[in-house]
Image: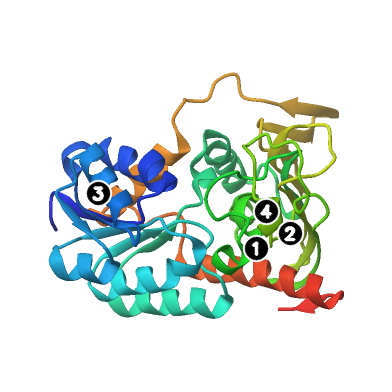
């Protein structure tokens, strides 16, 4: 086992420069970022100069052929997750791919199969799993404090939070809007805390009411004339164990709160609100609310990268697995399919 991981970055956009590269650098001598590539070659050159990355390439294939790597971070639009991840896995690299896994269930399954054949880790950038709130609540759940979790709500709602940058409003490159972008974060956090139960049926509805017209942009002005994704999605998921989950996700909706990311859980021994963390129980003849007086501060992005690096160096396996990625992708695509058909879809 190598003492220093040689890391390559695919995609030189915001998530690479603001999250992956800085947090790899925080891992010290465990990591050396040795290569970066982007189809927009000038952007890769700029990032390489900014972070002193020695090798710059145009494509992932050129990077894999030109530089020996142990780990690859895939930081591209969703459309390119599959090909970049599989190429890196086939080259013998561990892969940390940004969320969501892919555009389709078939692509997510291909990625999982490639990871299994290669015997390498494939993990996804669901950084909310690594938040102090989820980290703490998971220990309470594992200790039986909530009992059988039979109902959940996942919320990712913005009042006017359509991204004014990137390709987030381009369905051809992203596969969808808030559901597949921010909704998948809260969906994954809920599923993770529930033990990733097997989904059996979904019912979804999507709306495009606000994104296609000019309006107030709290995240910058967006290209409303080329807005091709939903601006809101709602869904219902049923699981094989009888549990259910309700999901709400929006880039833009007429609600009071500016931005809400949250998960709510209900079990037969207790319930919980995740952000901020509160636990609700009945004990000793009283209804009690429990909230932590202190939780250690750490960036969930930093913890995600550190845990992935440690896993690649022989530590505990990553929290996010390829199999979970396939399951989550089934729910996402099932909800979009249900919205298209106007009826429930069995998975």
Q: Which numbered disc flags the more N-terminal residue, 4 or 2?
A: 4
| Sequence-first tag of 3 and 1 | 3
Is disc 2 in contact with disc 1, using a CB cutoff of under 8 Å? yes
Q: Which residue is mark 4?
A: 178
Mark 2, residue position:
230
In which quarter of the view is residue 252 placed? top right
Q: Label 4, label 2: how many angstroms apart (C-alpha)?
A: 7 Å
**Between discs 2 and 3, the one toward the N terminus:** 3
* Mark positioned earlier in the residue sequence (4 or 3): 3
Q: CA distance from mark 2 to mark 1?
A: 7 Å
Task: Tell whether label 1 touches label 3 (CB within 8 Å).
Answer: no
Task: Say left or right for 160 vs 62.
Answer: right
**CA–CA distance in space, label 3 to label 1:** 30 Å
Of 195 and 117, which appears nearest the observer?
A: 117
Q: Could you say where residue 169 lies in the image, as x and y percent from the top left? A: 63, 56
Q: Is residue 320 above or below residue 17?
A: below
Residue 71 drawn at (x, y percent): 26, 58
Is disc 4 in contact with disc 3, using a CB cutoff of under 8 Å?
Answer: no
State how far apart marks 4 and 3 are (Cα). Answer: 31 Å
The quarter of the picture where the C terminus appears is bottom right
Q: Secondary structure at mark 1?
A: loop
The disc label shown at residue 176, or none? 1
Percent position of residue 2, x then y? 13, 55
Q: Pointer 2 and pointer 3: residues touching (CB < 8 Å)?
A: no
Q: Are the residues flagged by discs 4 and 1 in contact, CB closer than 8 Å?
A: yes
Contact, mark 4 vs mark 2 (Cβ under 8 Å): yes
x, y percentage for residue 106?
54, 80
């Amino acid at each position: 086992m190598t003492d220093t991981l040689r890391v390559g970055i695919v995609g030189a956009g915001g998530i690479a420069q603001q999250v992956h590269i800085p947090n790899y650098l925080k891992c010290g001598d465990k990591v050396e970022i040795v290569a970066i590539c982007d189809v927009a070659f000038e952007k890769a050159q700029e990032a390489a100069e900014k972070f002193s990355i020695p090798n710059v390439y145009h494509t992932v294939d050129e990077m894999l052929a030109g530089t020996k790597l142990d780990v690859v971070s895939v930081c591209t639009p969703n459309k390119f997750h599959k090909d970049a991840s599989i190429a890196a896995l086939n080259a013998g690299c561990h892969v940390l791919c940004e969320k969501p896994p892919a555009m389709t269930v078939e692509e997510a399954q291909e990625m999982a199969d490639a990871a299994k054949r290669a015997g390498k880790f494939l993990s996804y950038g669901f950084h909310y799993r690594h938040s102090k709130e989820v980290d703490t609540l998971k220990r309470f759940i594992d200790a039986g404090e909530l009992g059988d979790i039979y109902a959940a709500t996942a919320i990712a709602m913005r009042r006017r939070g359509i991204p004014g940058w990137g390709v987030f409003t381009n369905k051809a490159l992203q596969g969808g809007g808030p559901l597949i972008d921010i909704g998948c974060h809260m969906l994954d956090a809920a599923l993770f805390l529930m033990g990733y139960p097997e989904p059996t049926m979904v019912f979804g509805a999507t709306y495009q009411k606000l994104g296609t017209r000019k309006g107030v942009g709290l995240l910058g002005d967006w290209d409303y004339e080329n807005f091709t994704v939903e601006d809101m999605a709602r869904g219902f998921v049923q699981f094989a164990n009888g549990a259910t989950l309700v999901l709400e996700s929006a880039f833009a909706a007429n609600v009071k709160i500016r931005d809400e990311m949250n998960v709510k859980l209900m079990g037969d021994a207790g319930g919980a609100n995740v952000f901020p963390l509160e636990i609700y129980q009945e004990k000793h003849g009283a209804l009690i609310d429990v909230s932590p007086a202190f939780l250690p501060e750490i960036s969930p992005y930093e913890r995600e990268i550190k845990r992935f690096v440690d896993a690649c160096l022989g530590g505990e396996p990553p929290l996010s697995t390829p199999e979970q990625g396939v399951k989550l992708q089934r729910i996402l695509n099932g909800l979009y399919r249900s919205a298209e058909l106007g009826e429930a879809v069995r998975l």
